[in-house]
Amino acid sequence: MGETQDLGRRIELFSMDANCLDISLALYRRGTGESARVLVHSYSQLDGVTERVGFISQALQVKAGLEPVPGESGWLKFPCDGFHQRALTRAFLDVCKLASGTPLAVEPLSKFDKKADCNLSAVELGGGVYEMRPDQQTEAGHKRASALTRGFVKLCQMEAIEDHPDRAAFFCKTSHNALMGTLMYRAQNLRAAMREQESTASRGVLAAPSQQ
């Protein structure tokens, strides 16, 4: 019989993985500041779970820009001095929807926006600062660029920049292009993203092996 483990604090739960026998997957955190690190884990001992956890961990490295912690198998961290928990948990929920074996690539920093009827881009300015720009200089384009900025501020806990409604910055003053690309669609559709996250958080618990 399996036992629960001291993995730190659970910061997110994906309660039913349709791509792997409806198992529960969770993201755990240990440490603070520069020592903060996370682990993807499932208590299930069903066939294929180890491979599934490995795929989700690899997806977080590509899609969220995490990197392995030297000497700590399975643990991941941000390469900067900060820890972007809200953005990471959203990215975790999204990569858990990918089927194992899905080709992984960094998402572009530009996506089409229906309300603006043009592409919106997150342009890296350096020092962790990004500017949202429409590729058409219309009123709708600029309004949606400002809305996209607010979406990133909310989803990624970025800092709004005074007098620049189209700019936001990571407090660590480091660029996070992979994370920005992954969350671009979510930031464009903030209300739907927040409703989905609240719904996911209210479903199920991570069960020990004896209960699965």
Image (spheres, helix red, strand yellow):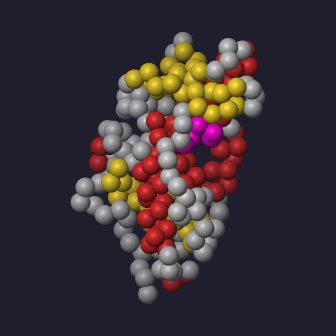
- Displayed quadrant of residue 111: top right
x and y percent of residue 86 in the render?
A: 51, 44
Which secondary structure is most common in the magenta stretch? helix
Q: Quadrant of the C terminus?
A: bottom right
x and y percent of residue 130 in the render?
A: 49, 25
Q: Which residue is the extreme one toward the left?
A: 71
Q: Which residue is the extreme one toward the front?
A: 103
Residue placed most toward the observer, 4 or 165: 165
- Displayed quadrant of residue 148: top right
Residue placed most toward the observer, 194 or 187: 187
* Rendered residue at 50%/76% (across/down): 48
* Rendered residue at 65%/63% (across/down): 203
From this view, report whether residue 37 is shown above or below residue 49: above
Q: Is residue 156 visible?
A: no
From this view, report whether residue 50 is shown above or below residue 121: below
* Rendered residue at 58%/52% (across/down): 94
- Displayed quadrant of residue 149: top right
From this view, report whether residue 48 is shown above or below residue 132: below
Q: Which residue is the extreme one toward the bottom?
A: 1
**Residue 185 within the segment the image draws in magenta:** yes
**Drawn side of residue 66 relative to residue 23, left or right:** left
* Rendered residue at 40%/23% (across/down): 126
> Which range of residues does the magenta coloring cover?
182-187
The mark total stands at 0
Q: Quadrant of the N terminus?
A: bottom left
x and y percent of residue 120 in the render?
A: 63, 27
